[in-house]
Image (cartoon, rainbow, N blue to C red):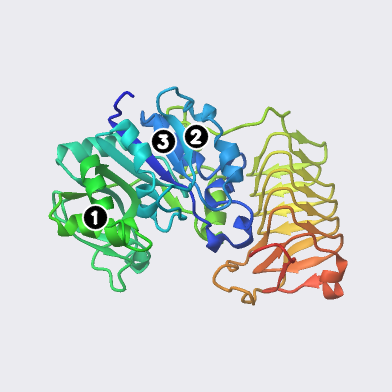
Amino acid sequence: MIRKEMIAMLLAGGQGSRLGVLTAKVAKPAVAFGGKYRIIDFPLSNCINSGIDTVGVLTQYQPLRLNTHIGIGIPWDLDRNNGGVTVLSPYERSDNSEWYSGTANAIFQNMNYMENYNPEYVLILSGDHIYKMDYEVMLDFHKENHADVTIATMPVPLEEASRFGIVIADENKKISEFEEKPKEPRSNLASMGIYIFSWKVLKEALYAMKDQSGCDFGKHIIPYCHERGQRLFAYEYNGYWKDVGTLGSYWEANMELIDLIPEFNLYEEYWKIYTKSDMIEPQYLSANAVVEKSIIGEGSEVYGTVYNSVVGPNVSIGEGTVVRDSIIMADTVIGDHATIDKSIIAENCKIGSNVTLGVGEEAPNKLNASIYSFGLVTIGEGSVVPDGVSVGKNTAISGETGKQDYPDGTLGSGEVIIKAGDSI
């Protein structure tokens, strides 16, 4: 086995429960983004663009779509005889078998995989952020400072800082303190959940903390390394980075892609974002179709009007239908004379004719006001909405619904329909 200088471990097992019905059937990193991509395409593309050719992808929750998408790694040039991409699911061992119970526990359970390559450095990544980063530059920073651990950080508004792990660093970027989600943050330099560890330091810390329940990098491993006097450094990143963990931030990040001059450009020649693409015919816009400031996926057919929206591949939008400020994912069919406003419609849905989504005044969602907010209509994968109904804001629909599910033909703002067998 050829020794690798640095391998990447990509944590992609998360449920993403704050995305509500969008992640009822798929892991968060497998959720569609920007039309033809999935969220995991971004860290995977960063790896190959940074010259990292050995990536372990740790999956757990609803892994089928993710496994199928990654395959043997061909789109990212990660189909290698030595290294490449490997999907690492929890497995049964002779001494014990358990689910991954924390970010660091997941890495610890794959010690054999890492030992295989005996790397000098291990890069730990999350599978659910949208950004472009050259990890090689971060590795150079790690080496220059003779660091044991380097944490990628970025400045955030102080009022949001309590959502993150916060570091306090001196003028040389050496970390003097690290606090996980402090109530009263004393700095606005937030950890991005991207770490480079020198292999010996990581191994020692994982073994030392292996009995901690839910062993986590932010809560256990980083504080352990800090207490042991290891050299911790903050690598400051100032590019575009979006945690698409809530429906609001997910919707916003998609909408930012269609700005006239997008802050995050999907199409830069020198830093391509790769994905698994099916060979399908181009888009078709009928003679009466109107499309403004939108992304339209391949194989989609538009007979109506689309403004300011992101439409995935193989979507059909009927005559007289108006789609505004919305995300429509792959293989969804929308009937004629429908009005779709500020909605997120997942893959493989059927929306009937004369349906109106996103009407009326906002009201807090009765099932979970913190998830289903931002004035959005959220429709889970494989759902059916019958002809002629109207749906208010801050609503969620999951499953095959019929006319009988909509008293007076409406679903009021803040209401939900979750069919038996469909989770929230």
Are discs 1 and 3 less than 8 Å apart at CB?
Answer: no
- Amino acid beneath label 1: Ala
- In this orientation, does residue 231 appear? yes
The x, y position of residue 305, in whole percent, is: 76, 47
Residue kind at label 2, given as amino acid type: Ile
State the image coordinates of residue 119 (x, y, percent, origin top left). 28, 33
- Name the residue nearer the viewer: 295 or 224: 224
Decide if residue 59 is on the left or right side of residue 322.
left
* Residue at the image position 32 percent from the left and 41 percent from the top: 123
Q: CA distance from mark 3 to mark 2?
A: 16 Å
Q: Which residue is mark 3?
A: 55
Disc 3 marks a residue whose amino acid type is: Val
Residue 422 lies in what quarter of the image? bottom right
User: Counting residues from the N terminus, which is met first, the one under dot 3 or under dot 2?
Assistant: 3
Q: Is residue 134 visible?
A: no
Q: Which residue is mark 2?
A: 273
**First reached walking from the N terminus: tag 1 or tag 3:** 3
In terms of depth relative to the viewer, which is nearer, 3 or 316?
3
Q: Secondary structure at mark 3?
A: strand
Mark 3 or 2, closer to the camera: 3
Location of mark 1 (residue)? 208
Instruction: Report the Cα–Cα distance between label 1 and label 3.
Output: 25 Å
- Could you say whether the residue bearing mark 2 is in a helix, strand or loop? loop
Residue 396, label in figure: none
| Quadrant the C terminus occupies | bottom right
- 240 relative position to 310: left or right: left
